Image: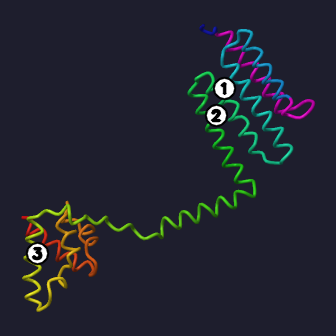
Amino acid sequence: MKTSRHGWLGLALVALGVLYLVGRAPGGPGWLWGLLGGGLFLVLARRGAPAEAAGLGSLLVGWALGALAADATGLQSLKLVGAGLGLGLWGGLERRELAAWGGGALLAAGALVFFWESPGGLFLALALLAFGAYLLLRPPAAPARASAGEADAGVFRALARWRSLRAAELGTVNTEVLSDAELGCLAALSDPQNPELVAGCLEKGGAERAAEIARVLERVRG
């Protein structure tokens, strides 16, 4: 049912009145007026006020309970947590997506404030620093080696011939030029022009050797 302008105006006036009582607290703590105001909104919602009145009531009741806990513990973040729980619960039950997201945002803000004002925040900061430093300093993962069983037979034979010729030029055995494992891995590469993949197949040697092998691969594949 569509709400009239008078209904929205009445809801706004009640909300302003409740906020004034919560902020000024003419008698008793603010959380008491929050509970009373939240209860009033819930009663109004049951008596035909706009459905949003129940959302405001849930928000205020949650805030009031959080404020009560804040007075007992000194953690002001509990006010935000309580308000977020109240609004988010109403939004979830009534399938009000905006209210549910708003409640979640209040909960997230409350969690940030909680860790800022509580001793647990120090441990959270240290954990964040340690995890961030680990991500920054850990060595990069080596490219996965391909198995010899996946090798291209033509490329494998061409590399084997080049290995034998290169070994004869250098006066050494062919496994000193390329080991059998390196040969199989290189022949199986899907992207032989990628220096990281080529280097990942080599058991020894640096960037210069990887560049040389990459040129040979490009030639034998061409």
Foreground residue, 39 or 131? 131
Figure check: 54 above or below 88: above
The number of numbered discs placed on residues in the rendered structure image is 3
Q: Classify mark 1: residues with Cα within 10 Å, few (<14), some (14-19) or many (20+).
A: many
- The first of marks 3 and 2 along the sequence is 2
Q: Which residue is mark 2?
A: 103
Closer mark to the observer between disc 1 and disc 2: 1
Q: Classify mark 3: residues with Cα within 10 Å, few (<14), some (14-19) or many (20+).
A: some
- The Cα atoms of the two marked residues, 1 and 2, are separated by 9 Å
Residue 171, horizontal then vertical, whole percent: 11, 92
Read off the magenta span.
5-32
Q: Classify mark 2: residues with Cα within 10 Å, few (<14), some (14-19) or many (20+).
A: many
Residue 76, horizontal then vertical, whole percent: 77, 45
> Callout 2: helix, strand or loop?
helix
Residue plotted at (64% across, 8% down): 4
Q: Amino acid at mark 1?
A: Trp
Q: Amino acid at mark 2?
A: Gly
- The first of marks 1 and 2 along the sequence is 1
Closer mark to the observer between disc 3 and disc 2: 3
Foreground residue, 174 or 190? 174
Q: Which residue is mark 1?
A: 90
Q: Which residue is mark 3?
A: 160
Q: Amino acid at mark 3?
A: Ala
Residue plotted at (69% across, 14% down): 9
